[in-house]
Amino acid sequence: MTPVSATSVSTDITATPEWTALTEHHAAVEPRHLRALFADDPHRAEALTFAGADLVADFSKHRITGETLELLTALARRAGVPERTEAMFRGEHINTSEDRAVLHTALRLPRAADLVVDGQDVVADVHAVLDRMSAFADRVRSGEWTGHTGQRIRTVVNIGIGGSDLGPVMAYEALRDYARRDLECRFVSNIDPTDLSETVSDLDPATTLFLVSSKTFTTQETLTNARNARAWLLDNLGAGDEAIAKHFAAVSTNAEKVAEFGISTDNMFGFWDWVGGRYSVDSAIGLSLMCAVGPDNFRAFLAGMHAMDVHFRETPLERNLPAVAGLLNVWYSNFFGTDTHAVLPYSQYLHRLPAYLQQLTMESNGKSVRGDGTPVTTTTGEIFWGEPGTNGQHAFYQLLHQGTRLVPADFIGFGEPNHELPGDGPDPAAPDMHDLFMANLFAQTAALAFGKTAEEIAEEGTPADVIPHKVMPGNRPTTTILAPKLTPSVLGQLIAFYEHVTFVEGTIWGIDSFDQWGVELGKVMAKQFGPALYAADPPDAGLDQSTASLIARYRAYRGR
Ligand code: F6P
């Protein structure tokens, strides 16, 4: 078998014998019900449950057999997953369309590790920035860092969008239990003026610190919000530009633009072009999170990511958590024809995880051409969505259980709760609230897998005309991911797990999961359209009929 090139993929994976074998295998597996698969093998759950770092993933409720995994891992080998994984970790330029290394894994290497890429000691660079971030976060947390009027900082406002927002806000929400309660973080991302206005409306500028986070420092949303935040601060403090150094810091790869904005590079924390926006929560982009949870917890978060990196790099594909999960996503997308993938964390703290994963997976794998520019020959990308359980149960699970669409889902749960509250009353033998919560997770995955037949429903005395409505078809695939407790390390493991899942899928499809050219056109057009909305005498912007009439209506609303 010839694996494809490690950096650029040009093989049409659908034309390989491994793909053909999976197509034939799918025809045999598709009609089988999970009830039968479990009945046939009393050791199925054990055989299809794998561990990596602190995570345990039960893949047994998937529509697979042992042979499916063998065929999928053969496909991964044909696609060059092991070689490309090594190329990524070594710092080869696997982001071919931007000619860049993809080294988010280097952001969590321990200090003693060794990695030189393009002549640069990457580990030393990473830890130098981490040390500066730690010193800064400690000063903010201890109150040593004071604002212009000498008061300590009570609110850190991160201004950023996409990867410069979603990672920090998701992780901050996830780790609230580890954060100082007297130092709040808020996040402004949208160019909708409502976002900044509402965020600062009850803040005291004297105790507010803005972190302007933008890899490029050219993003319209972020710079517009940052300029307005600066005006709000100076107006409300009644101060001049000398106050900026006490209330603004920047996180960016672009020192020149940061200085141009008026933030001293002494207050700037850098990272590198080999960190993609959606892979940057563990870079200086995580500074707001570090201010909230402290440097030690932030380093534990990085150590968790590193533990998952080691698992991914060193574990055979057959029991490698991200590899198996990524291959199953390919199995459903390409062989069962599913479009969407639900992520259902049984943790209120993880309520922003689905939004974070939307950027991670969809900006990475929503591509139509392979690495060499030729069109893909199968569907790519999955539409990720979800809500924390049990809220989702009372909203959209009906469709998961009885709808006509097949939606593979990840259920994520924890052993220890972050909060202990009684459940069914004062009896110490009764389940506590977390037991009730987790019972829902286990019940949902079992109901999705095994359903309830017409015979079983009839036995309960259900009237015949109602029976069809109550039949639960089952055979709905889920992965259950469990961890002992939601800690900084476990959160890091989960994020790295999904990063590598995304990488495995992208490698099978032969696409560049690390560029995002598809977001550019809209940005350029929004800038071009601006004058048509506000200019007294709008230039001919060559607008199409529909857009021209919508903008005319908008101008009328604004009295223009
Ligand atoms: O949406 C496109 C994008 O480039 C994302 O990839 C990125 O995370 C986001 O914009 C923000 O970019 P920046 O950090 O450069 O402001």
Image: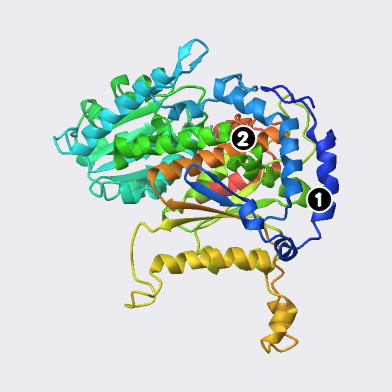
**Residue 279 pos. (x, y %):** 51, 34
Q: CA distance from mark 2 to mark 1?
A: 23 Å
Residue marked by disc 2:
503
User: In the picture provided, is 507 more to the left or to the right than 344?
Assistant: right
User: Does residue 261 appear in the picture of this structure?
Assistant: no
Q: Quadrant of residue 286?
A: top left
Q: Is residue 314 above or below residue 190?
A: above
Circle 1: residue type: His
Circle 2: residue type: Phe
Residue marked by disc 1:
26
Count of picture labels: 2
Which residue is at 41% across, 35% downward?
303
Q: Quadrant of residue 397?
A: bottom right
Q: Residues within 10 Å of mark 1 (few under 14, many from 20)?
A: some
Q: Residue 493, labelled with which disc?
A: none
Which residue is at 31% across, 36% downward?
296
> Is the residue at mark 1 in contact range of ligand 1, meaning its CB lies under 8 Å from it?
no
